[in-house]
Amino acid sequence: MKIKITGKELKITEALNDYVEKKLDRIDKYFENAEADVTLRTEKNEQIAEICVLANGERFRAVVEDKDLYASIDKDIDILEGQIRKSKTKKEKMMKDGSIRNMEVQNDTVAEIANEIIKTSYYEIKPMTPEDAVLKLQEKPSHNFYTFINIETGKVNVIHKLKDGKNYGLVEPEA
C-alpha cells in the first residue's frame, strides 16, 4: 500500500508514522494495490485524523476527532474497515452464482422454443365500428391491440396503438 502522511499544525514523528503504517496493514489485506492519504491535524483541544483510501476505483474516507490522536487513528481504521466490508459484501451479493445476471442460457434451449406457439389466448369477437373498437382499447390500457368484426365491411379488423401513444392504426384485409 502506498501511504502519504501529512501533518497540519503538527509534526509527524517516527512513532506516529510507524503507528499509522501498522494500522493501515488492516486495510491493506483487502486490496492488492491501494493508496492512502492520511492527514493529521490539531484544532484547539481536538486531534483530528482523516484517512482516505483509494482502491479498485473506489474511495473510502473517514474523519474522526478525539482528544488523543492515536484514538482518532484507531476509530478511522475501524470506520474504513466497516465501509470496505460493506462494499465487498454488496458486490458479492450482486455477483452471486444464483443471480439472474449470471445465469447461462443454453443455445439448445433457445432453439427449441424459437418456432413454437407457447401461448394461446381466447376471446370473443364482437361486431362494432372502428370508433367503438378504439373506445374498447382505451378501456384496457395494458393492451396494444383489439380485434373486432367491422360492421361496415363484415370482416375481421384489428385496431392498434401507434408508437406515439396518442393515435391508432386499423388493420383491414383487402379481399
Image (tube, grey):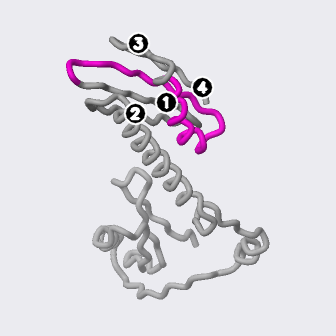
> What is the CA distance from the residue labelled 1 to the residue labelled 3?
14 Å
Q: Please name whichever residue, 133 or 9, is drawn nearer the observer in this view of the structure.
A: 9
Q: Which residue is mark 2?
A: 73
C-alpha gap between disc 4 and disc 3? 20 Å
Q: Place residue 65 in its image quadrant.
A: top left
Q: CA distance from mark 2 to mark 3?
A: 16 Å
Marked residue nearer the N-terminal end (4 or 3): 4
Per the rendering, the mark at residue 19 is 1
x then y, percent, for residue 10: 36, 14
Residue drawn at point x = 46 percent, y = 24 percent: 16
Q: Earlier in the sequence, mark 2 or mark 3?
A: 3
Quadrant of the drawing holding the N terminus: top right
The image quadrant where one finds the C terminus is bottom right
Q: Secondary structure at mark 4?
A: strand
Q: Quadrant of residue 160?
A: bottom left
Label 2, residues with CA under 10 Å away: few <14, some 14-19, many ≥20: many
| Percent x, y of residue 32 | 66, 38
In the image, which disc is placed on residue 11?
Answer: 3
Q: Which mark is residue 2?
A: 4
Secondary structure found at label 1: helix
N-terminal of the pair, mark 1 or mark 3, is 3
